[in-house]
Image (spheres, grey):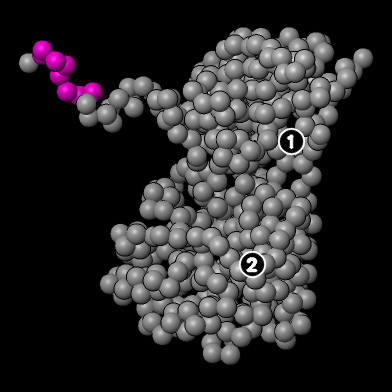
Amino acid sequence: MTPAPNPLAPDWLRIPADANALAPGLWPTSAVRTSTGELVLGGVTAGALAAEFGTPLYVIDEADARTTAVDLLAVFQAEFARIGTSAKVYYAGKAFLSTEVVRWMIAAGLNIDVCSGGELAVALAGGAAPERLGFHGNNKSLAELDEATRVGVGTIVIDSEVEIGRVAEAAARNNRVQNVRLRVNSGVHAHTHEFLATSHEDQKFGIVLTDAPRLVGLIRAEAALNFVGLHCHIGSQIFDADGFAESAARLLDVHAALLVDGPVPELNLGGGFGIAYTSADEPTPIRELAVALADIIATACARLNIPLPVVAFEPGRVIIGRAGVSLYRVGTTKTVDVSGTPRLYVSVDGGMSDNVRPALYGADYAVRLADRASTAAPVLVRIAGKHCESGDIVVDSDYLPGDVMPGDLLAVPATGAYCWALSNNYNYQGRAPVVAVSDGKARMLVRGETIADLLARDTGALLPTEGES
């Protein structure tokens, strides 16, 4: 018999008929349970992964990430070929970047987006050809611009008027004519299934759309720069195409005006495609988004009577997010009475050092037992981290079997994007390792940090203590 809902649970959260079941759409395609209930990822059991690499642990299903990248590129290329143009896809490295992931994305046919000198170095170390790279950022340093133009980065996204001269000087110094995009703000803000269209912007990225013609004129006046098109990013975790439609219409009006004075071969609509983090999330399938976006561009260009541009996109989360699962070991449990209603707190050996998104954005996640099944009735749980912050919550609300106990292994799905990338050393916690699983084997992608690693950066730890010579 299913218990009554806990009144502390959010309205969207339903009590599962089976608290062991893996909700579809949240987990890597390889995720299954054994006959004893143990979670298997890429053919490797969660218990084996925890035993070999410890916890907390980020696990990336290699086949899931690679296949998603290949399929996404194929869909976008097919749909834009249908309307008579082509599409470029850049993997947004900010979601999760390592040299091995760079190799996966390049092999899948994608380009790579970077937004710092460090990400540029990782992309190059992973074997990406410089011309396959796009360089973002609202405050790219002079050293970063010099390095980007020196190695021959494919495109640099100019984010402000002051960058025009900086990029031009760096390109001239390195004897290059540098392809550039201009990032603009369309006044459209999208998040999940909602978007807001305004006439003004108050954010650090890009320039006001009405300033674009003047700035493009300045770019075109620089012999070391080649303007390839406008760029816009309207938000993240977007579930449908409505916001893109409004933004594209606004951008293409300006795009058409820019064609009067010179070529504008491309239009970059950014990324932000969403994924499911909980069973309540219902993002539009990528194929449907690609169809809608191609039709949006075709209709707008026909309205303006202008040639179809090459259209570029920058997905990250939708490629790598579902491929990732985080494993934790339960340390303590305790029931808290909230005005007569119980909530079970389950504390694990990680927290906001390995997933700060709940604290930063109020992000919701799901959780399941990873090393066993249980027939106990489901209870509302809150998965808490071990850090000295009351906001250190990994999973705000979900249901687990009521016999969850210290020593259990837990798995949190959809952590492939923005978890390791935002990880930190709060409370002197070493950042967790990242492993890839495929065909029944696991291998390290990024080594975890030890206390010795952290102390090695503390110069005071190298000094003799008082009284020593």
Residue at the extreme right of the image, as rendered: 1
- How many C-alpha atoms fall within 10 Å of the one at disc 1: few (<14), some, or many (≥20)? many
Callout 2: helix, strand or loop?
loop
Q: Quadrant of residue 405?
A: top right
Residue lying farthest to the left in this orientation: 469
- Residue type at numbered disc 2: Gly
Nearest to the observer: residue 203 or residue 79: 203
- In the rendered view, tell whether residue 13 sits above or below residue 92: above
Give the magenta part as a residue range.
461-468
Q: Mark 2 points at which residue?
A: 187
Which one is nearer the viewer's eye here, 128 or 146? 146
Relative to 208, residue 402 above or below: above
State left or right for residue 296 relative to residue 212: right
x and y percent of residue 311 in the render? 64, 69
The foreground one among 6 and 219 is 6
How would you rate the neighbour count of disc 2 (Cα within 10 Å): few for under 14, some for 14-19, many for 20 or more? some
Q: Mark 1 points at which residue?
A: 278
x%, y% of residue 219? 44, 79
